[in-house]
Structures are given as C-alpha cells and as structure tokens.
Amino acid sequence: MNSFLLLVLLSVKVFSQSPQIEGYKVYYGSLHNHSDFSTDAQGRAIDAYDFARNVSHLDFFGLSEHCIYLTQAKWDSAHKISNAANRDSIFTAFCGFEWTSSSPYGHISIYETDSFKSVLDTSYDSFLEINSWIEKKKGLAFFNHPGRQNGSNLEFMHFESKPISNFIGIELWNRTAGFSTYYENDGYFSNDGNKSFYDEALLRGWRIGAEGSEDNHTANWGMYSEFRTAILAKANTKKDIVDAYLNRRFYSTLDKNLALSFTLDKHEMGDSASAGKLHLQIKAFDVDSEIVRLIVLKRNGDTLKTWFPNTKNVVINDSIECIKGEYYYVIVSEQDGDQAISSPIFIADKKPEIIVDTITPIDTTSNIDTTKAYIHQNQFYIVKPNPFSDKIEIVNNFKEDVWLTVYTIAGEIIIPSQKYTTTNIILNTNHLITGCYILKIKNSNRCEQFKLFKK
C-alpha cells in the first residue's frame, strides 16, 4: 500500500461521519480526565487533547484536574491549552476541576466556571458549600464514581440534601470498571428494593443523566477501554455539546459507537413529558453492525417492559401510561455483552415518590404545646425531649448501628447523616434556631422519622 493511500485511509478513520439518529448526530467522548497538572497523573495537558483527538478519535474530551493540586497559574494555563485545542465541527475541548473530598463527601467534576475552589479551603469543604458555589457560578457538575469515597457514610450526603439543577450527570462507568460496579449495585440504601446510586439520586429529585468517564491518569487518554459518554447534538461545537449536556441528552455506553434514541411522544431522553398515554419509541444500532439482543424499559428504577429484538437496527414502537412524578430510561444490551444506559425522561416536574420496604410515617402532631415536654417512644427508639433546646436524646432499643439526620420542614439538611454505634445518643442542637425539624433515624432495614420543635 503506498503512503498516499494509507494517509487517505487514516484521514477517513479520523474524520469519519458521526452516526445520525432521530435528527441528531451522535458524538462520543469523556470529560473527567487528568494530566500532570494534577501531580498524581502523567502526561502534559497539551498532549492530552491531541492524543484524545488524533489517536483515540474522541469527538469531545475534558480535563478536570484535582483541586488540591491546582494553583491559579495552573488553572489559567489549563484553560489556555483547552481553548487552543477546541476545533468547531471537529473536536470539542473542555477544562474544569475535580472537587475531591475523599473524606467524607465524595468527588465532583465541575465545568464551565470562571474559577475553581479547593476542599483545602474551609469555606468550600462541605457538600452543601460547594453546591452553593456551583449554583452561583452556573457550573455543570457530575457525581464521580459513586460509592468509592463512602467510608464515612456521607458521600454526596446520600443525595438527601436539596437537589440543584447544576448537577447533570452521574458516572455509571469509571476507568475500566463498568456498569457492574457503578450501576448494578444496591446504592446507599438497603431498604429500597436494591436501587442503584443512579436511581437513588433520581428518586430524590436530582435531574441527572447517565454518564461515564475514563478518569485517566496514565497519559493514554481515551484508550483505557471502549467505554464512552455519547451525546445527541446538532453539531460538534462547544455551544451544541453544552446544550446537549444541559438538556441531559446523553447516554452511558460500554460500546464506543452504539447509537441510541429513546423518546416518549417525541420527547428525547433528558426531557420532560406530560402525564397520560404516551407513544414510546426506541431506536438503536451499532456502526459495526453488532446485534442488539435485549432492551429493558425502567420505570422509577424497576423493570417495566423487555424486548428481544435480535437485530442490527432496532425500532420499537409501543404505548405506555405515564403518571406525574415518574421517570423512565432504557438499557440496551448487545450480543457481545456490551450495554448502554440512557438518561431518563421525566413525567412532568413532580418529584418521584420513594418506595421503601418499611417506613414509619412522620409524627404529624401540628400543635406542640411548648410549655410541656413530650417523649416520642416506640419499640425501637425513645426520642426526648420535645420541645428541645440545646440537645436531643435518643435511646436506641434496636441495639444496632443507626444513622441520624436532621432536616428543616422544607427538607434541607441541618445536621448531616452520621453513624452512631451506641445505644444512648445525644445530639447537640445549640446552633439550631427556633422552629420545627424532622429527625430521621435509619438502620440497615428500617427508617423512622419524628417531628420535633426547637424552643
């Protein structure tokens, strides 16, 4: 083969057309990666974008350096390199940072902000504090490798704080660990029917999509595996890719060129649809003509329908009755075992109902006489006094570890979830202002909630 023909063939491979599906082009890439700006990673940032584009043939690529290693000079240099690597219609480059609270709140990749914050800054070292900053800066945020940093049982505060719209995705694969690690699991809660981290977040109102990132530290960006995040966008420009992310129009795939569309009444994945009887359509195909063996439709994390198309080009049409507050997504499985998971379609804007195996309703006494002291007592716990002032006492008759969380009536966490191993527990409440609060007590298979008043 002469050198000219070889050059032509290589050019076709690098700049080949992206697959098209339902009016969109499909672009493949990975946002959460590292260079030597992170100190614990290899390779220069300038080489990372070049490798991702010209060797791994990614359509988009991002670096999110560890915040604890960043300086202002590194931040400025990283963005300058990223901007220079961006090529409209060819390659979209992102640059952000990874907020790395290994103990106890987890790792978050954050993009599209004009500055960065480190967990070493005590003003931004908690989950609620960094969330407030992300909202203020209008950043795009992703939950990274859920479960990996949960040693203190506080990772992402188990999605129980007030959701913010800036979180747009969660990793369902990371490095070479696929869905079996980050999706096919029992999440943080053992009493919800084996829901994954993905579903536990969705059930608590986080409107996130199915993402995955290579988290590359070894200077072979895009080559760890053939896993990808796939974006449905009109064009490969920064504007279009960001728009797709904001609209959760993306899916997580273990196959590097699987194309997928999932719609309800023509609302594509990531969108909201009205309640009622809706027309469902699923389309999928692999550029390499692999056989699609199985498709599963999930409703609120539970299997609703399955199909066995056993064909290269899947087109499924059906109708389903959708209720306000539900969400739906699909899982596609190929004959070789590769899978893809879509972002959800949300039915209206109501928060979905969380179904747990056993739960005691909140004490709904609305008129607490603040001149008297009450004791909440059942066979499991004693909670006193109510009203309380500087402390709440809990006697744990269950005699096993419990996790305690205190919320405002509006649902915002005031005292984050913490594990207790003793039978007699005292919560310090000096810092709380007068008002009503909810105390949640959770063990391995039960959840109790009590309404208390701070006088």
Image: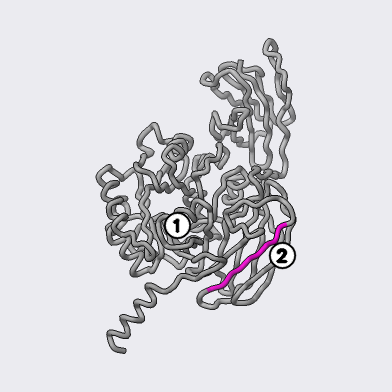
Question: Where is the C terminus found, in terms of image quarters?
Answer: top right
Residue 137's x, y, as percent?
41, 40
Is label 1 in a helix, a strand or a loop?
helix
Q: Residue at x 52, y 43 (%)?
A: 165
Q: Are marks 1 and 2 in contact (CB under 8 Å)?
A: no
- The amino acid type, in three-letter code, at marker 1 is Ile
**On screen, 8 above or below 398?**
below
Return the residue at label 2.
Answer: 318
Return the residue at label 1.
Answer: 241
Report whether 97 appears left or right of 442.
Answer: left
Residue 56's x, y, as percent?
38, 68
Mark 1 and mark 2 lie on one chain; the one further toward the N terminus is: 1
Give the camera-side residue of 128 and 449.
128
Give the camera-side residue of 221 and 357.
221
Q: Residue at x 68, y 46 (%)?
A: 325
Q: Is 347 within the magenta?
A: no
Q: Which residues are magenta?
A: 278-286
Residue 84 visible to an observer of this rendering: yes
Residue 85's x, y, as percent?
31, 59
Task: Tell me which secondary structure the magenta stretch mostly adopts.
Answer: strand
- Around disc 1, counting alpha carbons within 10 Å, would you say few (fewer than 14), some (14 to 19), or many (20 or more)? many
Residue 170's x, y, as percent?
51, 51
Residue 42: which numbered mark, if any? none
Report whether 2 appears left or right of 256.
Answer: left
**On screen, 339 above or below 433?**
below
